[in-house]
Image (tube, rainbow, N blue to C red):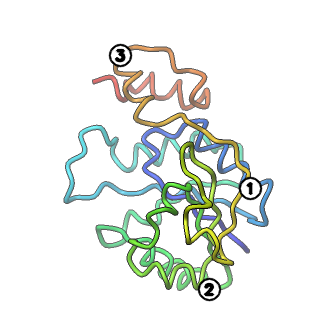
Amino acid sequence: MKIGLFFGSFNPIHIGHLVIASYMSEYTDLEKIWLVISPHNPFKEKKTLLQDLKRLQLVRIALEDNNNIKASNIEFDLPKPSYTIHTLTYLQEKFPNDEFSLIMGADNLSGFSKWKNYEMIIENHDIYVYPRAGIDLKNIEESKHPRIKITDTTIMEISSSFIREAIKNKKDIRYMLPQNVHQYIREMHYYEK
C-alpha cells in the first residue's frame, strides 16, 4: 500500500490540514494518508504546544468518520529530536510491505537540502508537495527531481498559530475547524490562556 505521511504539530488541527490531506487522498496515487503528530521536543520550551496526547485526540476526533486518513502517533516513542529519516526507516522496518511517501509544503521543500540524510530520503521516497503562498517552485532546484510530485492542492493560508491567538482573544473561529474539534476545544478550554 502507498501511504502518504503528513507530518505536523497539528496544534490544533484545522480545515487547512484536512483540505490538504483530502486532496492527497483523492487526487494522487496515495492510497492512505497518515497525519503524523510531531511530539514535543524535550529540549525546546513551547508554552503554546498542547500536550502530545491531547493533540493526537484532536486529530482523531477530526478524522473519526474517514477511512482513508488516520492519525499516527508513531513518533511519540522514537528518540528525540525526531528526524524524518529515522521515522521513515522505522516505518519501513515495521511495515515492509508498504511504501511510504512524504507530504510537504513548498516552503519545506525550499529547505529540504538541510534535512538530515535528505539524499537518502529523496532516493527512496516520493515527495508530494503542496503550494504555499509566496513560494515559487520554479526557483527551487529540488522541485526538478523525478521523485518530487508537485500537486495542485488549494493554497490554504490558515494557520494553527492564528487559531490559537484567536481563541485566546475570544474570537469566533468555528468555521476554521471541523465542528467536532471546535466543540471539543471549547469544552476542554484549550488555548484560552
Observer-nearest residue: 81 or 149? 149
The residue lying at 50 percent from left, 58 percent from top is: 7
Kindly state the secondary structure of the residue where label 3 is placed. Answer: loop
Residue 124, above or below 10: below
First in residue order: circle 1 vs circle 3: 1
Residue 136, above or below 99: above
The residue lying at 46 percent from left, 78 percent from top is: 118
Residue 133, above or below 189: below
First in residue order: circle 3 vs circle 2: 2
Q: Nearer the viewer, mark 3 or mark 2?
A: 3
In this figure, which residue is indicated by the disc labeled 3?
169
Marks 2/1: CA–CA distance: 21 Å
Kindly state the secondary structure of the residue where label 1 is placed. Answer: helix
First in residue order: circle 2 vs circle 1: 1
Image quarter of residue 38? bottom left
Marks 3/2: CA–CA distance: 47 Å
Residue 39, above or below 124: above
x and y percentages locating residue 22 in the rendered image:
71, 48
Observer-nearest residue: 83 or 96? 83
In this figure, which residue is indicated by the disc labeled 1?
25
Q: Nearer the viewer, mark 2 or mark 1?
A: 1
In this figure, which residue is indicated by the disc labeled 2?
96
The residue lying at 35 percent from left, 28 percent from top is: 191
- Circle 2/circle 1 CB separation < 8 Å: no
The residue lying at 71 percent from left, 57 percent from top is: 151
x and y percentages locating residue 158 in the rendered image:
53, 34
The amino acid marked with disc number 1 is Ser
x and y percentages locating residue 92 in the rendered image:
56, 82
Kindly state the secondary structure of the residue where label 2 is placed. Answer: loop
Q: What is the count of numbered marks?
A: 3
Residue that lies at the very extreme toward the front in this rendered image:
139
